[in-house]
Amino acid sequence: MPVSDFQPVIGLEVHAQLLTQSKIFCGCSTAFGAEPNRNTCPVCLGMPGVLPVLNQRVAEFAVRTGLALECTIRPTSVWSRKNYFYPDLPKGYQITQFDQPICEHGRLVIDTPQGEKTIRILRIHMEEDAGKSVHDAGGGQSLVDLNRAGVPLLEIVSQPDLRDADEAVEYLKSMRDVLVYLGVNDGNLEEGSFRCDANVSVMPKGSTTFGQRCELKNLNSFRFLKQAIEYEIARQVDVIESGGKVVQETRLWDVNKGVTRSMRSKEEAHDYRYFPEPDLPPLHVSAEAIDAAAKALPELPRAKLQRFISQYGLPAYDARILTAERPLADYFEACAGHYKDYKKLSNWFLGELMRLLKEEGTPLSALRFTPAQLGALLGAVDQGTVSANAGKDVLGEMFRTGKAPADIIAEKGLAQVSDTGAIEAVVDDILAKNAGEIEKYRAGKKQVFGFFVGQVMRAMKGKGNPALVNELLKKKLGD
Amino acid sequence: MQLTDLTMLELAAKLAAGEVSSEEATRASLARIQQVDPKVRAFLRVDEAGALAAARASDVRRKSGSPASALDGVPLGLKDIFLTEGVETTAGSRILEGFVPPYDATVVRLLKEAGLPLVGKLNMDEFAMGSSNESSAFFPCHNPWDVSRTPGGSSGGSAAAVAAREVFGALGTDTGGSIRQPAALTNTVGLKPTYGRVSRFGVIAFASSLDQPGPMTRTVADAAALLQVIARPDARDATSADAPVPDYSADLEAGVRGLKLGVPREYFTEGMDPEVEAAVREALREYERLGATLVDVSLPHTKYALATYYLIAPAEASSNLARYDGVRFGLRAKDARSLRDVYALTREQGFGAEVKRRIMLGTFALSSGYYDAHYLRAQKVRTLIREDFTRAFQQVDALLSPTSPVPAFKLGEKVEDPLSMYLMDIYTLPCNLAGLPGLSVPCGFTKAGLPVGLQILGRPFDEAGLLRIARAYEREHDFFRRSAPL
Ligand SMILES: [Zn+2]
């Protein structure tokens, strides 16, 4: 059977570092990039005698995420120990949640070529991150950096509802958007603060029994996720086609070779000996706390996208870009309060504003002008006070100096001339000097019209209102 | 009478009256250690410089009229399970030899803040796993009443040091009887507080859901005073109780008239030494004479307590002890060539036989396929045991029993027979499984001159009640005045 006769079945496990100031069970900073082992204390070093104390922000973030993903929040969830030896796991166990996680039974809607699709969320639980081992550090030694040990993580496990690599990528992107919107995660795949493992299996089309699955690791970009899943599907089909059996194992995505390779088999898998963490009482979340978190939930990316389309009458393309990040969407809405031609506003956002932000490397939060000033600029363009082209220069100046648009127009003399008499004088002058061109025009060479416009604008140093210039020229040429 | 024969409160009174300085008391303690510890071997480490510096600081406070607490200046010893900043702490294990903690346990900090000079670290069974102090990786501790015998364990060093007048009081920890059993075997008072009453932060963990630090002293009043210093909520221990701390000395002399004291029939069974039984029965009659009513009660699940304990405690220990892997602190096997070696050889060389036995037991109890039958079932039985006590305390104010089924046994006698060693804790460990407070108070001696202890178990957070009941008996029999024949 060819690959097309097989149905892939995919589930993702997302690990998202939470944007708390301090670690999950101690007061150490979670800041990225500190000198190795600087952000540590006896607790996250797993010293004898230390005890964990929960950072309540972690539970708040978990509840917020659970609600956004339409999960049921457990009133009482339980911490467990996952036991295994590894040099970057200081205590010899990871504190996590096992059979009683904080959130369960949620969903995330994604877009597919066939339309919307609901991917069920099995569970979300909180846990502590491990440290980092640095191998081949010289002298045959490995080094351990425990700055990351104890950084809070959410693990979000989907049901195996994804059916191809594109859906998996779409799911992961949507999940990232949601988490970033919620302010619980920075969505950074490269630094590993947002990462995922994929469980992949294949079965003959029409079958209802899932095949044996493999867990893929080291998928630190959307591209790698797609490539690894596609490779793995093809590999599993090959194994079955050649009469073999897929064995349950953990496989690593090899970025350089573009293949997945076996990391450990089921037989080599750890027995984690989970048991309830005796150092931490069960976590209680009150109904009031859940209600309050639900009320405080921000509008989520998907809802915002739909609203931008309906409320502002924007094309889906524009709405998608404007709502991709919450600060941009918020800024658009702030500006929309001062300027009502939303499509035109969107054009300025997608064109000039995003170009400036990108070129200058400025975050939106550092903009020096107000939404009202941007609205005033676009109003001035509409009214012909300044030309669209000059308006772009004005925006650039506002961007750099934070000065009001009216001041910039005045200072730089960018105001457009819309005085009919003044323009007419120039038009008459140009026509008088170019009798030969008038003949050509009248003889049918209509492109000469552009020549007259150019001459008038040059004479007026680009400040003539183009609409008026056109209108007067046409009238004088007898059209 | 020597200075070192004083109780903590007697010394505190003399300090307050200016009759003696803390430095004198501390020097007396250090001298006594030098004199008798070669025979007792209660100390793993003496911190002479640290203790004297603390004593002099105490004397300065005293002179300026601002003592830090009622016990300011009273020298104390610490089981080597409490982390002490800058002072080696080993939990009686080779694997932590040379480990100098970077921080103080919460209780150590509280003691320092209260001004008590800490004279040294006391011997113990390795990682508190044992009932005779013989699993100490360094050397066994000897019972001051008969140095051929064990002082009990795991806080054997603490009990022996207090009994031998080397320190005025000490802290121990109790996971299955490790404060009460050695107290019973050495004619001292040992109080295991309610789980959560005293912070475990900075106390090297054996079994997290059972461990509890507590005072070991010569008198009930001393235990009350010492508990007063260390009992308080601790934000660094999530299992620490938020319950208010009463004045433990307030009702100490209130007597037992009108109290109902339960006698659990499951605690008077075969295998108990006849002399121990006789002493305890005599104590029960004494309570009746003092106006209490004895009530026969049943704790039907007691027979499962030992098995339950030996699933839960080792399971937690197997995980708690995973951090001793040779990577960050303590021992690292010198001949290790690979990561696997670092783990395997370090733990092979660093842990003693009893610790390994319990790690194996616990790992097995948690293994996939065995978890439900062992660990999970043990947790269910634990609930039944707790319910036994809840029911009993609807009828009575406290429970009375022997602390240990036998008096101090010979060193070496049970080392080869772990099960008979485990049976030493049969009366003490149900209390840990239920998280209750328990106290052992001296209640006489055998004909051979070996101490016997009476155990009093109480409702959660009723340490004051236990102290009051113990004091009523102690007032009639000041066994604590007898000193060991060293
Ligand atoms: Zn830390």
Image (cartoon, rainbow, N blue to C red):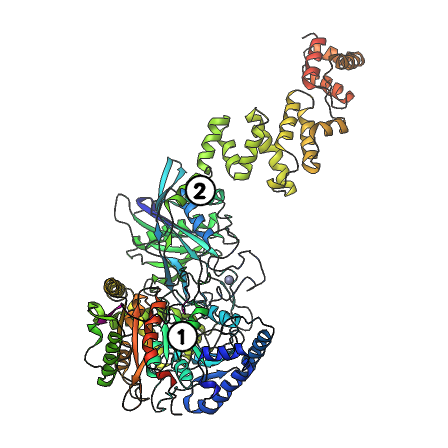
Q: Please check the rendered image and state whether residue B248 is part of the magenta-colored stretch, yes or no.
A: yes
* Residue A438 occupies quadrant: top right
* Residue A253 occupies quadrant: bottom left
Answer above or below: position of A405 versus B209.
above
Residue A187, horizontal then vertical, whole percent: 50, 48
Are circles 1 and 2 on residues that touch, CB within 8 Å?
no
Residue B327, horizontal then vertical, whole percent: 48, 72
Q: Please check the rendered image and state whether residue A101 is part of the magenta-colored stretch, yes or no.
A: no
Foreground: B358 or B387? B387
User: Horizontally, is B201 left or right of B454 in the view?
Assistant: right
Image quadrant holding the C terminus of chain B, namely bottom left
* Residue B403 occupies quadrant: bottom left
Helix, strand or loop status at disc 2: helix
Image quadrant holding the N terminus of chain B, namely bottom left
Question: Do discs 1 and 2 belong to a common subunit?
Answer: no
Identify which amino acid the numbered label 2 is placed on: Ser
The residue identified by callout 1 is: B221
Answer above or below: position of B237 versus B166.
above
Q: From where the camera sits, is residue B440 visible? A: yes
Q: Main secondary structure of the magenta part?
A: loop
Identify which amino acid the numbered label 1 is placed on: Ala
Foreground: B478 or B246? B478
Label 1, residues with CA under 10 Å away: few <14, some 14-19, many ≥20: many
Q: Which mark is residue A174?
A: 2
Residue ID at (32%, 66%): B435
Bounds of the magenta span?
Answer: B246-263
